[in-house]
Image (spheres, grey):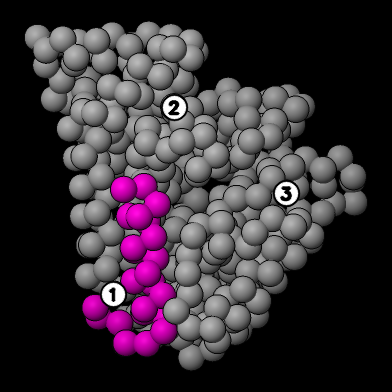
Amino acid sequence: MSQSPLPAESLGFEFADAALESRVRTGLEAVERALRDAARSEAPFVTEAAQHVMVAGGKRFRPLLVLLAAELGSEPGAAEVVDSAVVVELTHLATLYHDDVMDEAALRRGADSANARWDNSVAILTGDWLFARASDLVSDLGPEAVKIQARTFGRLVEGQIRETLGVSPGQDPLAHYLSVVADKTGSLIATSALFGARFAGASAEIQETLRAFGEEIGQAFQLADDILDVTSESGQSGKTPGTDLREGVPTLPVLIFRAQADPAKAEDARLLELLDSDLSDDARLAETLGLLRSHSSLQQAEDDVRRRADDARKLLEDLPEGLGRSALESLCDLVVTRSV
């Protein structure tokens, strides 16, 4: 097992109750063991490739949400809760292999991406294999779980297709981007919350509330990462600042800026010029980051993340009071404070 911090700890999540912390940490450890087992093949090379991104670490936000949502049910320690957490994390990991191929990324979590270490074919096939493992595991959770997983996967793929095709003529780039985030990130995090509640025996009403919560907090989580790409210092978030800028990946602060930029203003004109240029040069990237950090579009992006976290928190008002609800409320705070 890796000696890296537990996911909740790496996220900066603090538990207000020792018993809850113990249950969740035990669950996360079980998820981590099960992930390694699920990514093991009789063929040593397949095991190496499938565990390549997994052992590099990661936030494990989705399994954490599964376990916290399960606290709203009558059986938070049910084996199916851990199994469903493994399903959503395997699905997430599989998408990372495919994303790196499409983005031609050289690094993933500070290590060589699978496509850089081997080649695109190995990365794509490894992602497919992980999807297959997730499908195998979810089949043991029943036909309704299979349906939920299939529909979630469909949204993930549609989001990726629309991101690849780009903005249609006359379409608002920001609206397009937010719809992609909803499908690529919000959908699987929504399913994480739904699975946790479902397999812990929560009522149908609680399941639906948590699904909606996951959709909202999932989008906020991704958009917070967008802000971190601009504001973080090296090593602060595990992500090198300006990575998305360098790769030309659209993010919330940049899209807000482009929507309101005034080319008649010297600073806006310069930032537009930089954003449309090759940012592989360290000095140009540093200048771009400096201009974005001082522009009002960054504050607007931060306000958007706060609003989404507040909307997610409001959904929790319909849930029974207790440790589970309080922990989810803390998760809303975390999403905001990690980026704003």
Q: Which residue is mark 3?
A: 55
Circle 2 packing at 10 Å, graded few (<14), some (14-19), many (20+), is many
> Closer to the observer: label 3 or label 2?
2
Q: Are marks 3 and 2 in contact (CB under 8 Å)?
A: no
Magenta stretch contains residue 119: no
Q: Which residue is mark 1?
A: 316
Say whether disc 3 or disc 2 marks the residue closer to the N-terminus.
3
Q: For mark 3, give the secondary structure.
A: helix
Circle 3 packing at 10 Å, graded few (<14), some (14-19), many (20+), is some
Numbered mark located on residue 242 in the image: 2
Residue type at mark 3: give it: Val
The quadrant of the picture occupied by the N terminus is bottom right
Residue 300 x, y percent position in the rendering: 19, 40
Tell me if residue 214 comes above or below residue 234 in the rendering.
Answer: below
The magenta segment is: 317-340
Residue type at mark 1: give it: Leu
